[in-house]
Image (spheres, rainbow, N blue to C red):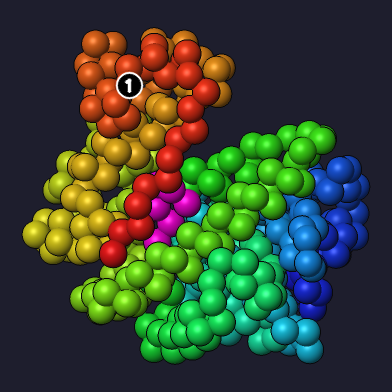
Amino acid sequence: MLTLQYNSDNYVDFLRVIASKMQADITGNQMVVPEQFGQGCIKAVSMPFNASVMVGEITPVADLALERTGGTNAFYSLQFTEVLEEKPQTVAASKQQVLSYLDNSFIALANGQLEAKNVIRAGTRLRFVLVIFERKHLAQFFEESVIDLFLGTYFAQQLQKGHFMPIDADYRLLMQQLMEVPADDPLCNNYITTRCMLLLERFITRFMQRAEAGKPLSIKTADEINRLMRVESKLVRDYTQPPPTIDVLSKAAAMSPTKLKKDFKQLYGLPIYEYYQKNRMRKAHTLLSGNNYSIKEVGIMVGYTNLSHFAVSFKKEFGVLPSELLTRDEVLPMGEPDL
């Protein structure tokens, strides 16, 4: 197991620690993981006012331990972690282990002054966006009273229930955009900063809207939430194939079909197949907006053999035909927060 220990409050500095440990070069704040350690790349960018971000996608060949020692500087780390390919559980990953294994996708806020230990299991392909910020960054979006309420409420719920906020279509889109921006783009840092601040604002707004609505999750355990998150990942993994049936998804979640449909809608805000279709069309919108594929190619990539059906579905979602989108300079709007 390779262990990376750090206590920095800046991810650019932490990237240097990783590069030194792996004997890798950093070019333009980006490091390619050496073959002897796995596959993937990691990049880190400093943002205004002591904030920083690290984004990456890695598949280690051996278990990779990340250990943050407690620090004296007051900061927070917002973590978006998505498991893209999961290695089957082993005995070493039992709940009795001291280290926490990153086997599930999640969004979480951590206090940077506290110790944290996590392990990325060998063979697990993981995508992540990590944002370090200070309390003063929140003042850009919220009043002091709201900030106090958010921090107090969030960490109180975290202690009681653990992580419960899922990575949904909107978050996944922002993560993908952060992954794809070229490191040598002259506007790379500005682009990343803007997207990270949007992630931060969106995370807090969604949390506070749910808290203020007084609609706590009826889903009782972290294990149930993790199973629902795996169902969501399975549902949107490959649009070239028909979506899994409710029976297949309920077996994957180890839930009855009725419970799965009820709990999925509560966690993600939409019924299962409405969520699938909305996410499918957003994927098509993103592909078309990139101007790298034809309408026919995009239709096939999201599972349509009949382009007329694709055009009708696209217009139903966005109000324009795919051909009309290509003549516009349109930005895909983010969905409304789900309560």
Residue pointed to by mark 1: 320
**Residue 193 against residue 310 in the figure, above or below:** below
- Residue 185 position by quadrant: top right
**Relative depth, front residue between 169 and 208:** 208
The magenta stretch spans residue 232: no
Q: Going 56% across and 55% down the picture, which residue do you hit?
A: 198
**Relative depth, front residue between 48 and 106:** 48
Residue 250 in the image: state x and y as whole percent: 18, 55
| Residue 67 seen anywhere in this rendered image of the structure | yes
Q: Going 11% across and 56% down the picture, which residue do you hit?
A: 257
Residue 25 in the image: state x and y as whole percent: 90, 47
Q: Going 32% across and 77% down the picture, which residue do you hit?
A: 212
State the extent of the magenta-drawn residues as a range.
165-171
**Relative depth, front residue between 162 and 125:** 162
| Residue 251 seen anywhere in this rendered image of the structure | no
Looking at the rendering, in which quadrant would you find the C terminus?
bottom left
Please state which amino acid type lies under the numbered disc 1.
Answer: Val
**Relative depth, front residue between 187 and 70:** 187
**In screen coordinates, is 88 left or right of 132?**
left
**Residue 287 against residue 326 in the figure, above or below:** below
Residue 256 in the image: state x and y as whole percent: 12, 61
Looking at the rendering, in which quadrant would you find the N terminus?
bottom right
Label 1 environment density (alpha carbons within 10 Å; few <14, some 14–19, many ≥20): some
**In screen coordinates, is 34 left or right of 250?**
right
